[in-house]
Image (tube, grey):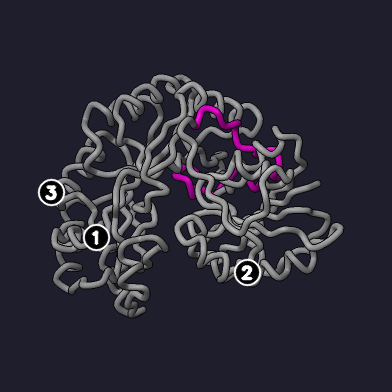
Amino acid sequence: MKVALVNPPQLELKQPKAYPPLGLLSLAAVLLESGIEVDVLNWADKTKFPAISDYSHIGVTVVDATIRSVRKLVPHLKDDGKILSSPRVIAGGPYPSVNPKEALLDLEVDCVITGEAEYLLPKIVSGEYPRKHIYHAGIHKDLNDLPLPARQLLPLDEVVDYSGIHGQSKGRGATTVSSSRGCSFHCAFCCKGHETYQIHRYRDSWLVRKELQILQKDYGVDHVRFIDDEFTLNHKRVTNLCRAIKNLDMTWMCITRADTVDDVLLKVMQDAGCIELNIGVETFSDPLLEKMNKGVTSKELIKGIQKIKKAGIIVKVYMMYGFPGETEEDRQITIDTLKKVKPDKFTVSMYTPLSGSRSKETDRIGWYYPDFFMRFKEQIMEAIK
C-alpha cells in the first residue's frame, strides 16, 4: 500500500513552488506515523503531468485556482496509476470542503474529504472506513497533536526559497510556517467565511519554536513567512510566541488585519524579528468595505498602517479591483488615501469570489476590464512613490 499526495499545477502564480504545500506535508506526516508509505508530488510548476504508477490511493488538494488543472489531472492519475487496478483518487482542500457534492461530480474523483483530513485519511487508506463518496473530517481542535509537516519528502529547493518573495533579502533561505488555523471574519469574497474555517486554533509557542529550530539546523532557513490567515487576533498568543522565538536570530513576516495591532504589540513583534506585515485592505472606500463585509473602516485601516510604519516594520497592502458595485469614485478614494498613508509595497488583484463565499452565491462572474485594471495598478504605483 502506497499513497501519493499531489499538489496540482498553479501556473497563474509567478513562482508556483515558492510556497511548499504545507497541508499535504501535514497529511503525509500523519500517514508516515501510521506506517503508510507516502510520496508528496509537488507539480505546482508542471506544464505536463509526469508519469505516475504503483499507488493505491492518490490525494489531490484543490483550490479555486486549480480546479481547471485538476479536471485535466484526474484522468491522467487514473490511467497512469496502476497497481492491481486504477488508484482511488481523493480530493480535499478548500473547494471540496465548501462544495463536496459539486466537487465530486465536477472533478470526477472517487471521493472527497471535507475539512482537515490528517487523522481520517489513514483510516480511509487502510480500509477501516467503509467506502463512501463523501467523508466529513471536521477540524482538529488541538493542533499540538499534529506532527510537524514532513518537509523531508520534498527536495531542498522545493522547501527553501532564495528569491526574496517571502520578504527576505535575495540569497537568504526562507520558507513558510503555519502557527494557527482558522479565520474569525466573514469577508464576502473569501471562502474562509464558511463554517469549515471559522474556529480559530493555535499551536503551542514552543512547538513553533521547535519547528523553526529544525528549519534553521536542517535547511539553513533564517527567515519565515507565517501563513496564518490572521496572525495578530490574539495579542496574548502573539506575545508568548514572540518570547519563544526572540533569541533564534531569525526574521519573519506575517499577514494580519490593520485593526488588530497596537503600538505595544508591534514593538514586541519587531523585537522578535518581524520585519514585514501584510494587510488585506482591498479598498479605502467605506461603502465598499461595508459591501465586502470586511468589518473594518477606512479610518481603522489608515490608523493601523500608520502604526506599523511608525514601528519601523515594512507594510504591504493587498488591494482589490472590480468588486461588484465598485465605482470610479470608490477607486479615487483609494488612490487619494494611498497617497497619504504611503505603504511600502502593494499587490492588486482582480475580484475573484471564492467557492463558499457570500459573493460567490450572487456574483459568480465578476466584471473585468484589462485596460482599466492596468490603469488602476499604475495609479497605485504612482500613489505610493
Q: For the residue marked with disc 2, what is the amino acid?
A: Glu
Between the residue at mark 3 and the residue at mark 2, the CA separation in whole angstroms equals 47 Å
- Residue occupying the point 67% across, 54% down: 131
Q: Residues within 10 Å of mark 1 (few under 14, many from 20)?
A: many
* On screen, residue 283 above or below 149: below
Instruction: Please name which of the two marks, 2 or 1, marks the residue nearer to the observer.
Output: 2
Q: Is residue 290 left or right of residue 42?
A: left
Between the residue at mark 2 and the residue at mark 1, the CA separation in whole angstroms equals 33 Å
Main SS type for the magenta part? loop
State yes or no: discs 2 and 1 in contact (Cβ < 8 Å). no
Q: Is residue 201 magenta?
A: no
* On screen, residue 294 above or below 374: above
Magenta span covers which residues? 143-170
The quadrant of the rendering that contains the C terminus is bottom left
Q: Residues within 10 Å of mark 3 (few under 14, many from 20)?
A: few
Q: For the residue marked with disc 3, what is the amino acid?
A: Lys
The mark that comes first in sequence, 3 or 2, is 2
Q: Residues within 10 Å of mark 2 (few under 14, many from 20)?
A: some
- Residue occupying the point 50% across, 48% down: 115
Residue named by callout 2? 108
Q: Which quadrant holds residue 304?
A: top left
Residue named by callout 3? 299
- The residue nearer to you, when weighing 133 against 79, is 133
Q: Is residue 162 magenta?
A: yes
State yes or no: discs 1 and 3 in contact (Cβ < 8 Å). no
- Residue occupying the point 52% across, 41% down: 176
Whole-percent x, y for residue 227 in the image: 45, 43
Instruction: Please name which of the two marks, 3 or 2, marks the residue nearer to the observer.
Output: 2
Can I make out residue 374 in this image? Answer: no
The mark that comes first in sequence, 2 or 1, is 2
Q: Which mark is residue 292?
A: 1
Can I make out residue 33 in this image? Answer: yes
